[in-house]
Image (cartoon, rainbow, N blue to C red):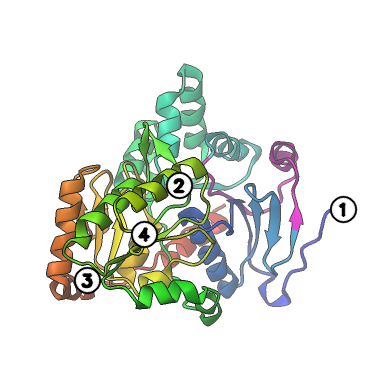
Amino acid sequence: MERKTVKDPTITNKARIAYLGSLPPPIGGISMDLQRLTERLSAEGYDYTVYDLLNKKKTYRDGTSEKIGNRWWWMLKYIFTAREDLICCHHLDWKLVVIVGLMTLLGHKTLVSIGSRSLSDAWKEGGWLRKKIIAFSLRRYSLVIAHNPVIKQFCLSLGVKPDRVKIIYGFIPPAVKEEEVAHIPQRIWDFIKSHTPIISANAYKIVFYQGQDLYGLDLCVDLCANLKRDYPNIGLVFCLPNVGDYNYLHKMEQRIKEKDIENNFLFITQSYQLYPFLMKSQVFLRPTNTDGDATSLREALFFGVPSVASDVAPRPEGTLLFKSRDIEDFTSKVRGVLESYEQHRRRLETLKPEDNSPGLLKVYRRLINKE
């Protein structure tokens, strides 16, 4: 039986917004962006529903949820029964991006948020028909939000009108919550307290891109071994909330053992917020071999943590870049940060704190009120 949303009487003049995406767990950049965005929407009084197609449930503004079941059958029904004033796609699956875009033809206002290269990769790897379908669908959206200039240029190249694509970065600062910090086991804090310097990195899960470790877990292992020569008490914390490929993880654990850094390298394979670890870190790493706009990197910079990232994508101001997959350059750049740590830390203090929620809310209001 379909649940009826009971609106708060104080927000009866507010619009209803639908999100097709996912919420934690597991924790990832896209799911965290959406969770924080919906928290801001609640504060503004908007009514919304998140159709979580990863966890197969729909979550309402009041926190209650229902199961969806098979997402494709549900999606087929939703196409013809959607009643929200604005439908937002925050999903990586190009087929869902296409479907939501085509819903504009049925009179719906639609928005897609593109924060990674997954859509452009799907377009490049597809045949003639897939290319045509993706391009046609993108051009139908009421608005396309690109998370960096490269994504915007891709959309324009497919014929999206310039006034229908806007760059708004996805990062929204976290609200530091005592219960989220307290949820982290003492053994992790013991590791952090007993090591210095602390370096942190993360991955949604183990993924390979063009035959290489996308998130650079292997590079982090080699980096830790290289830096241990000068910093014997170094600690590297790698957050991996959704392992994915356990065979590769075991391979990395063996590599850690062979390099004699078992006491210096900690995997965190449970789903915790990243910011408590960032607040205790001297350096944050983003050694990906491809990327869109990394929420974790922007979060590290928000907390004033000097950050070293690969040069595969546009990076936020304040990021120190290294040549992708080059362990010598990677090691050199991180060592340079540690040797001149206070200088790098003070440089980040001059940057304006980032919060993209006001820009997103402004876009929503414009779309919803537009006749």
Question: Which mark is first along the chain, 1 or 3?
Answer: 1
Q: Residue at x 55, y 34 (%)?
A: 98
Q: Which residue is located at x 52 percent, y 48 percent? A: 111
Q: Nearer the viewer, mark 3 or mark 1?
A: 3
Chain-order first, disc 4 or disc 2:
2
- In percent of width and height, residue 184 lies at 51, 73
What stretch of residues is rendered in magenta? Answer: 66-92
Q: Name which of mark 4 and mark 1 comes first in the sequence.
A: 1
Residue 348 got which mark? 3
Q: CA distance from mark 3 to mark 1?
A: 52 Å
Callout 1 amino acid: Met
- Residue 186 image point, x, y percent: 49, 77
- Name the kind of residue labelled 2 in the image: Leu
Closest to the observer: 270 or 178? 270
Mark 2 or mark 3, earlier in chain: 2
Choose mark 2 or mark 3, whichever is in front: 2
Question: What element does badge 2 sit on?
Answer: helix
Percent x, y for residue 76?
72, 36
Q: Amino acid at mark 3?
A: Leu
The tag earlier along the polypeptide, 4 or 3, is 4
- Look at the numbered discs 2 and 1 and tell me whether their residues touch, using CB distance below 8 Å: no
Magenta stretch encompasses residue 176: no
Using the numbered discs, state the Cα–Cα distance from disc 2 to disc 1 in whole angstroms. 43 Å
Cα distance between the residues tagged 4 and 2: 14 Å
Per the image, the residue denoted by label 1 is 1
Asked whether, in this view, residue 333 is left or right of residue 309, the answer is left
Is 108 drawn above or below residue 262 in the view shown? above
Which residue is disc 4 drawn over? 262
- Which amino acid, by three-letter code, is at mark 4? Glu
**Neighbours of disc 1 within 10 Å: few (<14), some (14-19), many (20+):** few
